[in-house]
Image (cartoon, rainbow, N blue to C red):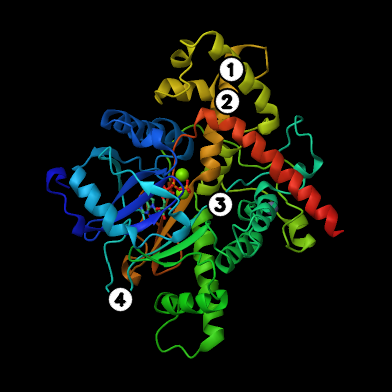
């Protein structure tokens, strides 16, 4: 990519989240991730190029030096910070504006700083040499959210140890009008390691994708949430796309049966990719992936009780879910236990503002930061070190609760079906899959008080609304 010869016609709208907008190159498997800011937030729009570049470099450092060692080398692609011509960015912003969903237009793309994050296009991660014209790689994106129940003694509301955060949050979002339907997805089912529960979790994601599920074909999004669309119709459309991949040509199954069949096949491939243990020679120390008794099932999950009781709550070591869950569980005090420690740190920073940089509150995100996350006092000795460590760990866990998993499924001729490298594992004959993790931004220290208030709001609303319905 030659940065001085950027042409907006080479790029197209790819997608966006709450914090960034992503464009993909029309030929090369690359994306640019541009930051967004809210129209009311004038402060951010006045960031200088150097400040913005530093901010994006911080994201790269964090992915590379903190999240990658925790989540595994094979899954994380940190990308690089780039400076782009302002004219290119302005043209690009005009070009993508009409593609953007209305619900995301409360924020605008940063067209002032000229800085962006350049990443491989993970929906096209070409793990397979035999690219087929009529069956380009499929990519499934899952934003799994938090996969365990807190067991911290600091938790004050009993319901938090029974119903998971995602399920409680659903009720809150539904009531506030953010979503028109409740999702039946429960992260605890996805992270259970039990194939039946995982199967249903993914089925529920397909039925109601919201922000947690997308499918791409040849890099184009073909399935995601459409707020007011007829869901059933969508699933049939999806099945049409999937037929060439999962139904042998000349097959006699038709109509509704075939939809069920191909969706079933897709889910099987996803489950097996999520449970594959990927070679991770360069990754950090192995961790336990066993969810402690009682932290692996959610009372709000609609699954049959027998299935929940029989669930083995064990994930294969080094599978992507185990890596994410292990990192999420660095939050072991819960926000309620963390809050007093946050206040301890905050008081300290008010008394000694210069400590902010020594304690690496806003980075730099280097090996030293990772060291602070991974070692230090494990019991509260009243020290600032302990409090800072827990605050860092909490923020790392927040990132892991917010990331997305990308699973690329490439059809492969039978002969090539058993290619096995670091990144490629055969799943079903005829497919290779590769898995990566994206959206690994550091969560700001300042957002912790907000998290604390949000937690109380969600839990109180859940208690109120479920009591009212009994
Ligand atoms: P969130 O609101 O979840 O925090 P965000 O604003 O931080 O989102 P991302 O999740 O990084 O933004 O990107 C938005 C979307 O763009 C992703 O959900 C994904 O579909 C797509 N995307 C991001 N990075 C890549 C990539 N490297 N390759 C392909 N698609 C990507
Ligand atoms: Zn749940
Ligand atoms: Mg995201
Ligand atoms: Mg994000």
* Label 1 vs label 3, nearer the camera: 1
Cα gap from disc 1 to disc 2, whole angstroms? 8 Å
Asked if residue 134 is positioned above or below residue 20 in the image, the reply reads: below
Cα gap from disc 1 to disc 3, whole angstroms? 30 Å
Crowd tier of the residue under label 1, counting other residues whose Cα lies within 10 Å: few below 14, some 14–19, many 20 or above: many
Q: Which mark is residue 391?
A: 2
Q: Is mark 1 within 8 Å of ligand 4?
A: no
Q: Is mark 3 within 8 Å of ligand 3?
A: no
Cα gap from disc 1 to disc 4, whole angstroms? 57 Å
Instruction: In the displayed orientation, state which residue is furthest to the left.
Output: 5
Q: Are marks 1 and 4 in contact (CB under 8 Å)?
A: no
The quadrant in which residue 357 appears is top left
Quadrant of image for the C terminus: bottom right
Q: Earlier in the sequence, mark 1 or mark 3?
A: 3
Quickly name the residue at label 4: 134
Asked if residue 389 is positioned above or below residue 125 in the image, the reply reads: above
Q: Are marks 1 and 3 in contact (CB under 8 Å)?
A: no
Q: Earlier in the sequence, mark 1 or mark 4?
A: 4
Cα gap from disc 3 to disc 4, whole angstroms? 30 Å
Crowd tier of the residue under label 2, counting other residues whose Cα lies within 10 Å: few below 14, some 14–19, many 20 or above: many
Q: Secondary structure at mark 2?
A: helix
Cα gap from disc 3 to disc 2, whole angstroms? 23 Å
* Label 2 vs label 4, nearer the camera: 2
Q: Secondary structure at mark 1?
A: helix
In front here: 42 or 156? 42
Q: Secondary structure at mark 3?
A: loop
Q: Is residue 326 left or right of residue 130?
A: right
Q: Position of residue 436 (x, y in %)?
A: 42, 49
Quickly name the residue at label 1: 345
Q: Secondary structure at mark 4?
A: loop
Residue pictured at 27% horizontal, 73% vertical: 133
């Amino acid at each position: 990519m030659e940065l001085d010869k950027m042409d907006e016609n080479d790029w197209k709208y790819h997608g966006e989240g709450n914090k960034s907008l992503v464009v993909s190159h029309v030929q090369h498997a690359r994306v640019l991730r541009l930051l967004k800011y809210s129209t009311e937030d004038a402060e951010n729009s006045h960031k200088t190029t150097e400040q913005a570049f530093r901010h994006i470099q911080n994201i790269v450092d964090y992915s590379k030096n903190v999240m990658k060692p925790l989540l595994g080398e094979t899954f994380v692609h940190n990308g690089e910070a780039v400076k782009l011509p302002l004219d290119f960015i302005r043209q690009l912003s005009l070009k993508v504006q009409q593609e953007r969903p209305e619900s995301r237009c409360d924020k605008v793309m940063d067209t002032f700083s000229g800085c962006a994050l350049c990443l491989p296009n993970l929906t096209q991660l070409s793990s397979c040499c035999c690219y087929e014209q009529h069956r380009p790689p499929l990519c499934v994106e899952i934003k799994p959210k938090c996969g365990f129940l807190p067991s911290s003694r600091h938790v004050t509301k009993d319901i938090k140890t029974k119903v998971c955060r995602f399920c409680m949050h659903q009720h809150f979002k539904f009531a506030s009008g953010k979503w028109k339907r409740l999702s039946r997805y429960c992260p605890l089912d996805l992270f259970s390691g039990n194939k039946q529960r995982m199967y249903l979790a993914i089925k529920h994601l397909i039925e109601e994708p919201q922000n947690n599920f997308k499918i791409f074909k040849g890099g184009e999004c073909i399935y995601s949430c459409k707020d007011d669309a007829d869901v059933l119709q969508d699933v049939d459309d999806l099945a049409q796309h999937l037929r060439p991949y999962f139904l042998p040509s000349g097959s006699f199954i038709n109509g509704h049966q075939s939809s069920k069949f191909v969706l079933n096949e897709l889910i099987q491939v996803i489950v097996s990719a999520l449970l594959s243990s990927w070679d991770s020679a360069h990754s950090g120390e192995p961790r336990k992936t066993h969810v402690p008794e009682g932290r692996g099932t959610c009372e709000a999950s609609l699954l049959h009780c027998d299935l929940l009781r029989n669930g083995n709550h064990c994930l294969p070591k080094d599978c992507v879910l185990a890596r994410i869950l292990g990192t999420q569980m660095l939050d072991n005090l819960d926000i309620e236990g963390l809050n007093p420690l946050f206040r301890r740190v905050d008081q300290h920073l008010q008394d000694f503002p210069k400590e902010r940089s020594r304690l690496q509150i806003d980075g730099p995100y280097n090996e030293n930061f990772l060291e602070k996350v991974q070692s230090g006092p494990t019991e509260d000795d009243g020290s600032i070190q302990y409090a800072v460590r827990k605050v860092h760990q909490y923020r790392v866990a927040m990132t892991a609760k917010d990331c997305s998993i990308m699973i690329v499924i490439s059809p492969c001729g039978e002969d090539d079906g058993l290619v096995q490298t670091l990144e490629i594992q055969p799943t079903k004959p005829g497919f290779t899959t590769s898995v990566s993790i994206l959206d690994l931004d550091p969560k700001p220290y300042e957002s912790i008080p907000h998290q604390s208030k949000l937690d109380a709001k969600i839990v109180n609303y859940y208690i109120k609304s479920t009591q009212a319905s009994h």
